Amino acid sequence: MRDVLAELLPVWRAGDTAGLATVVRTFRSAPRQPGAAMVVAPDGSVSGSVSGGCVEGAVYELATEVAATGAPRLERYGVSDGDAFAVGLTCGGIIDIFVEAVSRATFPELGGVADDVEEHRAVAVATVVAHPDARRVGARLIVRPRGVTGSLGSARADAAVADDARGLLAVGRSEVLEYGPDGQRLGAGMEVFVCSYAPRPRMLVFGAIDFAAALARQGTLLGYRVTVCDARAVFATPARFPTADHVVAEWPHRYLAAEAQANAVDASTVICVLTHDPKFDVPVLEVALRLPRVGYVGAMGSRRTHEDRMSRLRAAGLTDEELSRLSSPIGLDLGARTPEETAVSIAADIIAKRWGGGGRPLSETAGRIHHDARLEGELKDHLTRY
């Protein structure tokens, strides 16, 4: 829903009703992931996507109907055995889509959820999408790190779902959870879709150069909150980096150490050092590579710069294990030349590291296209610790 909030909120605030279709479950090669959404406004206009075009028409009609009747529906779309080009996904995937009417009456908490998303506060929305009692379908629980609002119909269900939703929220995962009709953990019959709105991950770019401007645009496109930092105030200006969320004039290592001390750097944060000047990049890399959990650390420079940088970092006391976390020279081998092409190669490297991709052309690989291993590992790690 995050991607259609801007279109959904005006309808909600005006007291009208919109049809909201959300991908809640996928199988095989589905084009959109759980949480992807489409909104059909009262005037018939549509925003968002649930399938990249495969079933948009059918979902549009269903969302229009549900907005009018108020009766939520859970529908499955996929390739049928008899006709792969009927209403379905010709890519071979299957998706479950939950369609509901959204208004002030059906979703009174939407304004608060939107505020949380806007202010980068973690929040999860748990919605009953299937239940033996049709009256409980569409019931909603808003789960925050501390406290819940709403109800799924019973205190037992609320407690079980809130606990599990916080685990999913911690790793930014959205999925359907199954319980007994009253929230029994070893039961079946009630399906709850938990949509996690974790704060947007951070991208910290050190070095206010033209490559940083191009990378800031890529980072924004990928959904990161981008900060550009440079010790030289004359270069670190918002005018030079209009797509960055923040531009900071400060020594990089001091800024990063302060952010880490404030718990503003976590396992989803990516750090890109583009200064290729040892007086800037070595101190900030010392801090970055010693952080206990960070998503990605990369540094720009030639092969010669890389070797010199590694020598300086070893002299500073960094271990081989710490140095192994550094992606340097930064980016994948795409043959990039321009700042924009280089930014694409860096973004591609970040994506590959995040999802466990190998960086090879898909035409040279076999098996699943989408990688889930790292996210599964993070979820298991969180559940073990909590």
Image: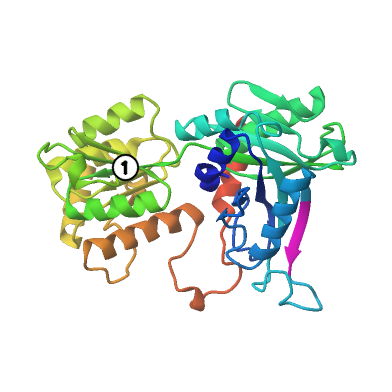
Which quadrant is home to the N terminus? top right
**Helix, strand or loop for the magenta stretch, by majority:** strand
11 or 220: nearer the viewer? 11
* Residue 229 relative to residue 189: left or right: left
Give the residue at x 46% y 34%.
Answer: 118
Rendered view: 187 above or below 217: above
| Tally of marks | 1
On the image, the x and y values in percent for residue 154 come to: 82, 25
Residue 151, image quadrant? top right
Q: Nearer the viewer, residue 284 or 163?
A: 163
Q: Nearer the viewer, residue 229 or 318?
A: 229
Q: Place residue 113 in its image quadrant.
A: top right
Residue 72 visible in the snapshot = no
Which residue is drawn at the image coordinates 33% and 58% (left, top)? 346
- Residue 289, by quadrant, is top left
Residue 91 in view: yes
Residue at 21% across, 65% down: 338
Q: Residue at x 68, y 69 (%)?
A: 89
**Location of residue 7 in the rendering, given as x and y in whole percent from the top left corner:** 53, 45
Residue annotated with mark 1: 319
Q: Does dot 1 land on a helix, a strand or a loop?
A: loop
Magenta highlight range: 74-78
Q: Position of residue 318 (x, y in %)?
A: 28, 40
Residue 25 at what x, y percent from top left? 70, 53
Q: Is residue 45 left or right of residue 164?
A: left
Q: Residue furthest front?
A: 43
Amino acid type at mark 1: Thr
Asked if residue 345 lies in the magenta stretch, the reply is no
